[in-house]
Image (spheres, helix red, strand yellow):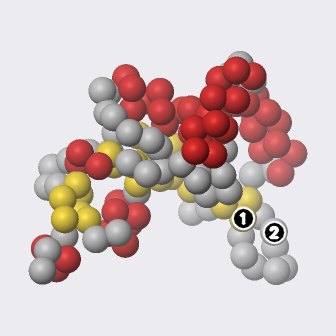
């Protein structure tokens, strides 16, 4: 079941999240994202920092988006999540309904796995 979200409430919540980080932290995130060609890759600097902080807390090396992906993201790239591994990060993203008659926005849960939690898919080992 999709939960309808008021667009103005979403904008307000988004601004609150952005205020969790200092301008210096956001500038750092933008610099790292730029160096890794991640600008415009469907992740905001604040979300980038969220994932990066959880990675650091869990002693996971790397860069969000490059070294972390959803289950489906790893599959598309020729990897599979190792048996028994659990996502190290869960959050929500906001998705806009593609129906022209209704431009509703609703939350969608996603889970991220680190590169240390995946292996090459058997069908791609050849």
- Binning the other alpha carbons within 10 Å of mark 2 as few (below 14), some (14 to 19) or many (20 upward) gives few
- As rendered, which of 73 and 35 lies closer to the eye? 35
Q: Residue at x 63, y 29 (%)?
A: 28
- Binning the other alpha carbons within 10 Å of mark 1 as few (below 14), some (14 to 19) or many (20 upward) gives few
Q: Residue at x 19, y 65 (%)?
A: 120
Q: Is residue 88 left or right of residue 65?
A: left
- Occupied quadrant, residue 56: top left
Is 112 above or below relative to 18? below
Q: Residue at x 81, y 73 (%)?
A: 102
- As rendered, which of 99 and 112 lies closer to the eye? 112
- Occupied quadrant, residue 18: top right
Please state the horizontal and vertical placement of residue 65, each as a whole percent of the image. 48, 50
| Total labels drawn | 2
Mark 2 or 1 closer to N-term? 1
Residue beneath label 1, please?
96
Residue beneath label 2, please?
103
| Residue 118 visible here | yes
């Amino acid at each position: 079941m999709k939960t309808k979200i008021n667009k103005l409430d979403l904008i307000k919540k988004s601004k609150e999240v952005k205020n969790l980080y200092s301008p210096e932290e956001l500038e750092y995130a933008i610099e790292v994202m730029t160096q890794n060609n991640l600008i415009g890759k469907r992740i905001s600097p604040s979300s980038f920092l969220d994932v990066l902080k959880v990675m650091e807390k869990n002693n996971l090396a790397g860069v969000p988006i490059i070294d972390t992906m959803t289950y489906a993201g790893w599959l598309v790239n020729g990897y599979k999540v190792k048996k028994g591994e659990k996502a190290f990060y869960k959050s929500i993203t906001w998705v806009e309904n593609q129906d022209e008659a209704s431009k509703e926005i609703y939350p969608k849960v996603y889970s991220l796995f680190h590169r240390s939690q995946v292996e090459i898919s058997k069908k791609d080992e050849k």
